[in-house]
Amino acid sequence: MTDPFWMLLVMQNLGREYVVWDAAAEISFVSPGRGDIFAEFVLTDDRLAEIRELTRDGKKALVWFDTEVLAADGSVVARVRKQLYVREKRRSTARAAAA
C-alpha cells in the first residue's frame, strides 16, 4: 500500500537532476487492518534541503522515511520504513562544458 509514494514524492520534488530509487523497506504489523486504512505522506522543504545537502558534489545518500498505517479509528495497523537511494545525475563532460 505504501510502496511507491516516498520515491514518487522525492522524484517529483527534486526534479530530473536527481536519480531516486527504492533501496529497502521494513514493515512491522501491529494490528489487523479491518475496514478502511490510511497513510499520510508529508515531504517537507526541510527534508528536501537535507537530501540536497547530503547529495551535494555527486555524493549518494541512503535516506529513510517512516510512515504509520492507521485504521479509521486512529489505531496503528503497521509501521513502514522506506529507504531511498538518492544522488544528483552525473553530467557528461560535453554537457558540463557547454553549461
Image (tube, rainbow, N blue to C red):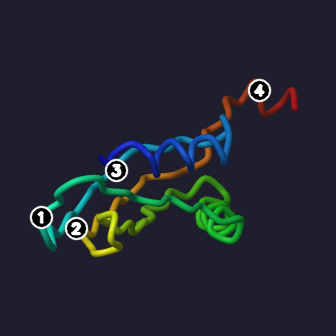
Q: Residue 70: percent from the left, percent from the top?
A: 32, 66
Marks 2 and 4, Cα distance to the nearest angstrom? 49 Å
Label 2 or label 3, whichever lies nearer to me, is 2
Distance of mark 2 from mark 3, alpha carbons? 13 Å
| Callout 4 amino acid | Arg
- The tag earlier along the polypeptide, 2 or 1, is 1
Q: Nearer the viewer, residue 76 or 84?
A: 76
Image-quadrant location for residue 69: bottom left
Q: Secondary structure at mark 4?
A: helix
Residue nearest the observer in this picture, 95 or 49? 49
Amino acid type at circle 3 is: Thr
Residue labelled with disc 3 = 2
- Spatial CA span between label 4 and label 1: 53 Å
Task: Please name the residue that numbered disc 4 is placed on.
Answer: 95
| Image marks 2 and 3: residues in contact by CB distance under 8 Å | no
Q: Which residue is mark 2?
A: 77
Residue 98 location in percent, x, y?
86, 26
**Which label's residue is closer to the chain start, 3 or 1?**
3
Q: Earlier in the sequence, mark 2 or mark 4?
A: 2
Number of residues whose C-alpha sits closer than 10 Å to that of mark 3, classed few (under 14), some (14–19) or many (20 or more): some
Pick whichever of labels 4 and 1 is earlier in the sequence.
1
Residue that carries the numbered disc 1 in the rendered image: 32
* Distance CA(mark 2)–CA(mark 1): 6 Å
The reply to whether callout 2 and callout 1 are in contact (CB within 8 Å) is: yes
Q: Residues within 10 Å of mark 4 (few under 14, many from 20)?
A: few
Q: Is residue 38 above or below residue 53?
A: above
Q: Element under label 3? A: loop
Residue at (62% x, 41% y) in the render? 12
Could you give the CA–CA distance between mark 3 and mark 1, rounded to whole angstroms? 16 Å
Mark 1 element type:
loop
Who's the residue at 39% across and 69% down the image? 66
Q: Quadrant of residue 73?
A: bottom left
